[in-house]
Image: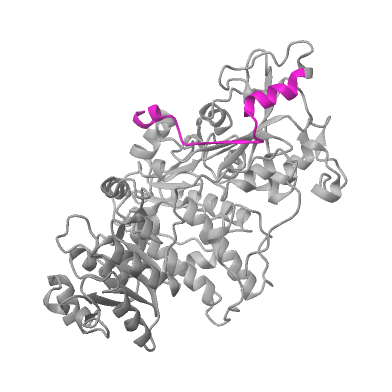
Amino acid sequence: MEAPVSTSPPSSSSTAFPAPKGGASLILSFRLEHKTTLILGADSLAASRAFAALEADSKVLVLSKGGLKTACNEIRWRAEQGQLNVVDFDTLPGSSTTKQDSPDMDSKPVESFLNGLTGITVSLVCITDTVLGSPARRSRLSAERLYKVFRARGILVNTTDMPDLCDFSFPSTHRFENADTGETTPLQIGVTTNGQGCRLAGRIRREIVARLPREVGPAAEKIGRMRKWAKEKSINHDDPVEEEDSYNDSGVATPNRPVPTRSKSETAAENARRRMKWIAQISEYWPLSKLARLDDGQIRELLAGHQFSNEDKNSISLPSVHSLSVIPPPGRILLVGSGPGHPSLLTLATHSALTKHANLVLSDKLVPDAVLSLIPKDVEVRIARKFPGNAEGAQTEMMEAAVEAARQGLTVVRLKQGDPVVYGRAGEEVLYFRERGFEPIVVPGVSSALAGPTFAGIPVTQRGVAESFMVCTGVGRKGKEVQLPGYERGRTLVILMGVARLAQVIGALLEIPSDLSGSSLANGTQRRAGVAYPPHTPIALIERASMPDQRVIESTLENVVKALESVGEQRPPGMIIVGWSVLALWCKGDVEVLHDGAEIHDTERVKRWLGGPDWRVREGLDDDWEGL
């Protein structure tokens, strides 16, 4: 039965979704428990395929001419250990009656073998005796006949060195171990060149593994344990969560999507969902080394939303009551900006505070691992536990921890992303600490509001395009909506913390009716102060600015929501740049936006900038940044 074909007319929209480009593979990870992998051949390659299948919990059957006698040492050893079964090809029904030079010499016995299997379903087949250069290499015609036998039964086949007889291929893989215990971890990576260079794939895999920190495997293990506990029960372990509830966080577009404030009356299922949201956030932000060191007790505290102390192996050394100084010397608190993320953008003052002066670092969750890794190992690092719906509580918790440590004579670094006073709540903390007897030192940082656009090739001011810029937030206190400024042709608007609420932000800027976008605040105040923005106004979303996985999505106000939906998972933190400066330096540049009468050419200007599609996506940093 043929699949139904859509008869609707083609869309007239100019929306440009990514065009599929053939030649790639659909990379999947198969769970093979209770399934069987059949391998034809018993050489070292067959042993490699068998080992991979066994690690995936598959049962393994090996068909070998001569059985164990002709099998390689590893196949024989695994058979003796009971890990797999070897069947002598020459004992199969029909193997002795088929002519030796017939193309069906092997296909008919294999078909009889499959028919005789009871209680076993073969899911995958690996034909390994077709490897190039082997003196006993299976003929092309024989491999084709075998392929047809398996495909007629819906069994996927991999035929070595015959790509057209392959339904799947094997990437070059690496399974990570715990460097301390030698135990395997759940983390596994694979690299494929889609048949264009297996040796190169192996080299790339090795280089990826060499660049990843040694804690990456244990970190995946701890996150898996955390997810399992969050799904199974409530944190008190007495209220089972309904199995039909979905907690798969892998498909979450952004882990920063707002959630309701925590309530004492929430159900076990609601609490479990909140915990899964929290796990998604720490998976995104926490340093791998910190995740790898979590013990079971700390994991339970994380799921409960509590901050635990002495969480590093090397805890803070507090003054002893037997020390010469009975009263510890007064400590100090530094409010430090870490810049947009790239370690080379740290100021000398920030670098010195982290590497020379800090006894305790209280870090916001958005500070990247590349910055935190500069902190000496004997300095305790706590990351703000802004458990979904608990942002205010987490903020208070960090401030209380800073005061407590400072009273014990420690130097506390309160580490914030960007600049502390640009939506970093530094003002609140200054007043809080001052009221408790500490005058904090505020160390400026490079603001992401300026650095982010620069990394994306966007000037916030540009002669002939943007005479001013404004920085605002996309979300107010406790998640409330804010009033955004109206359109001014010569002004660049930088919106921080707004990507997770992009549809609402765009609705406010375009003056979409409130019943569609919520363009009015709850008290009736309009969400925009001033005239509406033209729908074709350029906009850029900059995610993970200054980091190796930086992504820039460029479009217009009318198409940017669809653009963001088309690129998959979001990469927080992100910012929004609105205005004509977005296209000012693209290619040959366009610095005549503010000329008299320039508005009449805006449509052409935008089309020339985007080159036809409704949006453009740019990935990564300039290579020259790697050595800076």
Residue 222, image x and y in percent? Answer: 40, 64
In the foreground, 46 or 262: 46
Q: Tell whether 393 sits left or right of 529.
A: left
Res. 560 image quadrant? top right
In the foreground, 18 or 502: 18
Q: Tell whether 315 sits left or right of 76.
A: right
Residue shown at the point (61%, 76%) measured from the top left: 244
In the depicted structure, whether residue 330 falls above or below residue 169: above
In the foreground, 615 or 209: 615
Query: In this picture, which residue range is highlighted in magenta?
Result: 601-628
Number of marks in picture: 0
In the depicted structure, whether residue 602 falls above or below residue 375: above
Q: Quarter of the image containing the N terminus?
A: bottom right
Residue shown at the point (49%, 56%) measured from the top left: 282
Q: Tell whether 80 sits left or right of 201.
A: left
Q: How is the image coloured?
A: one colour
Q: Quarter of the image containing the C terminus?
A: top left
Residue 395 visible? The answer is yes
In the foreground, 575 or 188: 188
Residue 498 visible? The answer is no
Residue 489, image x and y in percent? Answer: 75, 22
Residue 26, image x and y in percent? Answer: 46, 56
Asked if residue 379 lies in the magenta stretch, the reply is no
